[in-house]
Image (cartoon, rainbow, N blue to C red):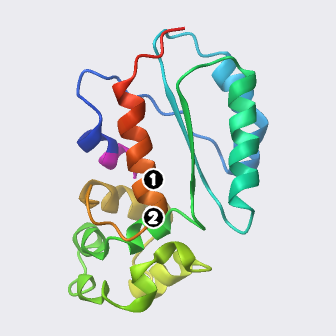
């Protein structure tokens, strides 16, 4: 998802690299080591994690504390409220285009899609909505390039975009 999205936001002269973790436990266990070992100067970092059933503020503070303890500057921690799929449910036109499913975008006006961050299980909702055509990895890759930068109904998606814009405007030389 980030690959498709960041290509629209991040200036082309900024080189993007992805550090992929295998789930939230792997992230929390290895984030310090991966950031601390990063040697490219003038780097900034985005740490993105699903909230799942945890407390958003506690999760964000824990990750921010890990990042701060590395001494790295220019670290942005963002939590997808409930799940990343909330971002997609906030832009059903992107789902329609990415998964090539007709008429899903017409449902954007329904109450539950007006604030998808409040849904208890966004991934299940997306599976149901797409009749199981959505799959986490392939679906994210397909939908990501179609996500609009304006008008997404997911507040956490909008906060993510705002943070990325601010992050790319600063020089965080160490």
| CA distance for labels 2 and 1 | 6 Å
Is residue 131 among the parts visible in the rendering? no
**Picture coordinates of residue 146 (x, y %)?**
25, 60
Front residue (pair 35, 165) = 165
Residue drawn at (21%, 87%), measured in percent from left and top?
Answer: 103
Report which quarter residue 153 is drawn in.
Answer: bottom left
Q: Main secondary structure of the magenta part?
A: helix
**Picture coordinates of residue 118 (x, y %)?**
56, 77
Q: Compared with residue 119, is residue 34 higher up or lower down, i.e. above or below?
A: above
2 and 1 marks in contact (CB < 8 Å): yes
Left or right: 36 with respect to 78? right
**Picture coordinates of residue 143 (x, y %)?**
32, 62
**Picture coordinates of residue 169 (x, y %)?**
34, 27
Residue drawn at (36%, 91%), measured in percent from left and top?
Answer: 110
Q: Determine the secondary structure under disc 2.
A: helix
Q: Which residues are magenta?
A: 1-5
Instruction: Write down the residue under mark 2.
Output: 155
- Which quarter of the figure is the C terminus placed in? top right
Residue drawn at (36%, 44%), measured in percent from left and top?
Answer: 3
């Amino acid at each position: 998802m980030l690959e498709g999205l960041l290509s629209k936001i991040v200036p082309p002269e900024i080189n993007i690299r992805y550090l992929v973790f295998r789930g939230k436990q792997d992230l929390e266990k290895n984030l310090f080591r991966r950031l601390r070992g990063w040697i490219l100067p003038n780097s900034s970092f985005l740490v993105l994690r699903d909230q799942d059933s945890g407390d958003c503020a506690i999760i964000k503070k824990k990750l921010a504390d890990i990042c701060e303890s590395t001494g790295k500057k220019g670290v942005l921690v963002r939590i997808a409220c409930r799940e990343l799929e909330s971002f997609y449910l906030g832009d059903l036109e992107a789902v329609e285009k990415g998964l090539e499913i007709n008429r899903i975008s017409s449902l954007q006006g329904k109450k539950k899609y007006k604030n998808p961050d409040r849904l208890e299980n966004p991934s299940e909702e997306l599976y149901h909505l797409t009749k199981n055509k959505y799959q986490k990895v392939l679906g994210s890759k397909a939908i990501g390039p179609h996500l609009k930068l304006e008008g997404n109904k997911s507040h956490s998606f909008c906060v993510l975009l705002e943070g990325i814009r601010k992050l790319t405007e600063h020089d965080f030389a160490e």
